[in-house]
Every structure is written in C-alpha cells, then in structure tokens.
Image: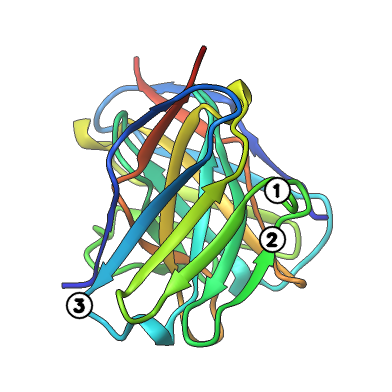
Amino acid sequence: EVQLVQSGAEVKKPGESLKISCKGSGYRFTDYWIGWVRQMPGKGLEWMGIIYPGDSDTRYSPSFQGQVTISADKSLSTAYLQWSRLKASDTAIYYCARHSSGPYNWFDPWGQGTLVTVSS
Amino acid sequence: EIVLTQSPGTLSLSPGERATLSCRASQSFSSSYLAWYQQKPGQAPRLLIYGASIRATGIPDRFSASGSVTDFTLTISRLEPDDFAVYYCQQYGSSPEYTFGQGTKLEIK
C-alpha cells in the first residue's frame, strides 16, 4: 500500500525554527515528486512547492519562495518542510502528497497532515 | 497564473438528490491537468477525478466529471450521507504551478 506518514503536531513560538517530515512507503520514493500543501484554519488548499527526491530538484510557488525550504533524504524515503523563523500566520495544517507520473497531474495519496500552531 | 473559481460556495441538498459543482478557470488549459478532490472534516483531501473525467481507483460511479477549456463540472448522481464534504478542483500549469479552487461545501439540507 502506498502511504505517506507525516510527523506529529507542533506548537511553536514566533521566531522559532521548525522542520516537519513526510515518510513514504509502499513505492520507490525516488521515482515520484512530493508536493506540500497548506491549509490555514477554515480555509482552502494552497500549493507550496514540490520536490523530486531522486535528485532533489525543487520548485516553489511564488507565494512561498523564500518563506520555506523543501528538502528530501532519499535514504530515509522522507521529505521535509522547514521554516527558519516561524510567524503566527504560519499556523495551519500542512499536507504532503505524492504527485502522479505520466501525462496527468494530480496528488494521491496524501499524508494525514501536520498541524503547526505558532503562538506566543 | 490561472485562477479557478468554484460555484456555488455552498450547496444544500438532501440524500438521493443530484449535485452539480462547477469549476471555472480564468484561462484555458488542457483538461488532462484538471483534478477533483473531496475533503471531509479532520481528514486529508482524497483524489476523486483526474484528467477532468477519469475516476480515481475506488471512487464510486455515482461520481462523474466533465469539461474542457475553462469550464469543468463534477456531478454526484445520487447523494449519499458520506458524500457531504468540501470539494476542490485543482489544475496544473507550467513552471510548475498548481492551483486549487476555493472549494464548494456540500451540506445536508
């Protein structure tokens, strides 16, 4: 079974750093792009960026470029999303999702989500 | 950047009724790049449709979708209690760039 399992909920203070993870299993991790999606409280889905673990090729949404860093460790079959200095506005649920291969473009499956709460 | 506008924002229907959800794009793009997702409270999104009209594995045939160019539709033929959720369309653009619609909440009337 193809599965993405994300790290647990985090509570942080503004200005702190954070790195959350997304571990893939049930498939060759290096063969599929992994995307990250933000969902702020009560809001919709926003694409943040995507990484190809095979060579760490990474693309960012202009809205998130410079705000976060996406990385991957193929030896651990794990992708990461990190912040160097969190803001209260980073409070959200963050999902990772595997990107399709072939001519279509979709995300499936999704991780269960990581809730990040940033509050003083 | 392509903007996806979903309508209506909220749709109130009863089980057994037919639901029609719309996703309109600000520019045309290939229908191969349009997907639909369902999200229930407290859960991650689930892929329903890709390539504008192809049901994902395990998705019941009461879900169907169509459309091209700038207008896309998701139809649920006979609503079941489990179908009440938020639905998002998503498109892929070059760069790459992925855009989601703002969502349609399907609620029980």
Dot 3 and dot 2 residues touching (CB under 8 Å): no
Front-most of residues A66 and A106: A66
Residue A90, image x and y in percent?
Answer: 58, 31
Q: Which residue is mark 2?
A: A60
Chain of the residue that carries numbered disc 3 in the rendered image: A
Nearer the observer, disc 1 or disc 3? 1
Circles 1 and 3 on the same subunit: yes
In percent of the image, x 75 and y 57: which residue is there?
Answer: B70
Q: Which residue is mark 3?
A: A26
Circles 1 and 2 on the same subunit: yes
Q: Is residue B102 left or right of residue A10?
A: right
Dot 1 and dot 2 residues touching (CB under 8 Å): yes
Q: Quadrant of residue A32?
A: bottom left
Q: Which residue is mark 1?
A: A64
Distance Cα–Cα, label 1 vs label 2:
6 Å
Chain of the residue that carries numbered disc 1 in the rendered image: A
Residue type, numbered disc 2: Tyr
Image: B85 above or below A69: above
Q: Quadrant of residue A57?
A: bottom right
Residue type, numbered disc 1: Phe
Image: B64 above or below A2: above
Q: Is residue A51 left or right of residue A80?
A: right
Disc nearer the start of the sequence (3/2): 3
Front-most of residues A54 and B96: A54
Chain of the residue that carries numbered disc 2 in the rendered image: A
In percent of the image, x 53 and y 29: which residue is there?
Answer: A40
Q: Quadrant of the C terminus of chain B?
A: top left
Distance Cα–Cα, label 3 vs label 2:
26 Å
